[in-house]
Amino acid sequence: MAANEIDAGLEQAVTFLQGGVRRPGIEAGLRVIETWEQRLAASESSELVSIAENLADLRMLLLAGDFDPAAVGRLLVALGEQVQEAAESDVGAPIADRLSRLSVLLTEQGNALADQ
């Protein structure tokens, strides 16, 4: 995957999270999740495949319509932790700053939902 594709994809994910998970028009966010799920699942890194599996779980929870905010929140926090671990690893080193930003947003959104 080219660096500009990664940058654009990360920016889409950040933009989606900044808008909040619970909002009308979540379809665009689901497309972002599915795109990253597919990209990471195709990687050769077990660390990234694990993130893809949690993204699949997140997508399924969000597709449920009236989803359980606490369950989604816990999953977002877990994803935030995984993304931060990826940022600190060799695989994430080239884009560590963006991954760290994404990790913070995932954790913040997760905590906000889990507290509802």
Image (cartoon, rainbow, N blue to C red):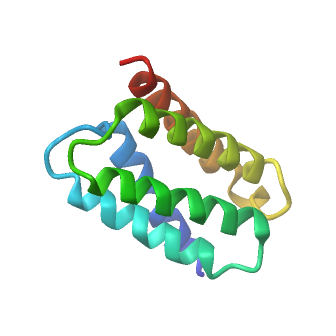
User: In this view of the protein, which residue sits in the foreground, 67 or 25?
Assistant: 67
Q: Residue at x 38, y 59 (%)?
A: 60
Q: Residue at x 21, y 49 (%)?
A: 65
Tell me if residue 47 comes above or below residue 98 in the rendering. below
Q: Which residue sits furthest left?
A: 24
Residue 77 place in picture, x, y as percent? 57, 35
| Picture mark count | 0
- Residue at horizontal 15 percent and vertical 52 percent from the top: 25
Q: Relative to 2, is 50 on the left or the right?
A: right
Residue 90 in percent (x, y) is at 85, 61
Q: Is residue 98 above or below residue 35?
A: above
Q: Residue at x 22, y 60 (%)?
A: 27
Camera-side residue: 17 or 97? Answer: 17
Furthest residue in direction top, as rendered? 115
Q: Quadrant of residue 59?
A: bottom left
Quarter of the figure with the C terminus = top left
Q: Is residue 73 left or right of residue 26?
A: right
Residue 80 x, y percent position in the rendering: 60, 41
Q: Quadrant of the N terminus?
A: bottom right
Can residue 10 be seen here? The reply is: no
Res. 18 visible in picture:
yes
Residue 104: percent from the left, percent from the top?
A: 57, 33
